Image (cartoon, rainbow, N blue to C red):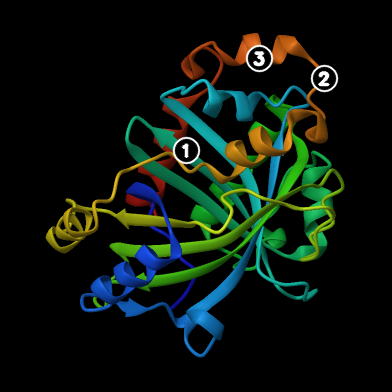
Amino acid sequence: MSREMQLQRWELKYIIPEETAQAVRRFVSSYTVLDDYGVGKPHNSYPIHSLYLDSEALTIYWHTINGNKNRFKLRLRFYDNEPDSPVFFEIKRRMNNAILKQRGGVRRKSVDYILAGHLPQPDHLVKQGNPKELVALQRFSQYLKEYKAVPKAHIHYLREAWVSPHDNSLRVTFDRNVLISAEPAARLETDQVNPTCVFGRDVVLEFKFTGRFPDFLRECTRVFGLTTTTAAKYADGIALKGEKFFGWNNAIGHLRAKKPLEEFDDTHVFQEDVRATRTLF
């Protein structure tokens, strides 16, 4: 199964102990299949690494802390240290209760060039000739400049994923051993310096779906008494470890971030991007 993602979906998150996670896995495995990347791996899991970018005042972080309804994150996702492996530039946006994502796979040798503020080019993409990914990369570059965003945090965890056997409409993921460390240099290495465990021994469970909430997941929440929570790996990690480790040195950033995102963001343009990738490509 490829690492393609839904353009728009809903996400429900839960923080649960390992014992409950094992029981939930047994329940959902009757309706789903193991993600290909977990097959044959220890504990059915594979590593995920994300480099989060933010302004010096941590404006994007404060959007989450303040609970802005429409907010987004900028991150680079990678899975190993191989020089030929792609790095995925991602915009993850929350609009009310819906999650929208744009993502473009970039050649690793082109990452520094784009992060330096240069305009992304089609040949920077792993899949050249893919208009959707080029749109995502260009939008990422725009936000990079608008927010003067720079690398801030490296987050790593092990993911166990179960998916719909029919299509890409459903994912159930278990994220374990979530670690955060300061990363100001965009090393894109899998090792971390002085990491902090964000959720301890607990597991971050996520139900991700594109249509209505599946009946079997509704029953799962009832049987195991699951209660939704935020479980924001980036924001919770910085709050736990301390803003001082991530370059927060300007109280004005906190005040500015209290403004509604619509006052200084182009949500409507993002929606146009989504419509364009659906109808034109």
Question: Which residue is labeled 3 in the image?
Answer: 254
Query: Residue 249 bears which disc, if any?
Result: 2
Residue 155 place in picture, x, y as percent: 67, 53
Q: Is residue 212 left or right of residue 127?
A: left
Q: Earlier in the sequence, mark 1 or mark 3?
A: 1
Q: Which of marks 3 and 2 is nearer the N terminus?
A: 2
Please, what secondary structure does the residue beneath circle 3 have?
helix
Q: Which residue is nearer to you in this view: 102 or 98? A: 98
Kindly tell me whether residue 142 is visible in this rendering: no
Residue at 42%, 70% in the rendered image: 161
Query: Residue 146 bears which disc, if any?
Result: none
Please, what secondary structure does the residue beneath circle 1 have?
strand
Number of other residues with Cα within 10 Å of mark 1, as a class: few under 14, some 14 to 19, many 20 or more: many
Question: Which residue is labeled 1 in the image?
Answer: 93
Residue 273 place in picture, x, y as percent: 45, 40
Residue at 41%, 43% in the rendered image: 100
Q: Identity of the amino acid at label 1?
A: Arg
Place residue 36 in its image quadrant.
bottom left
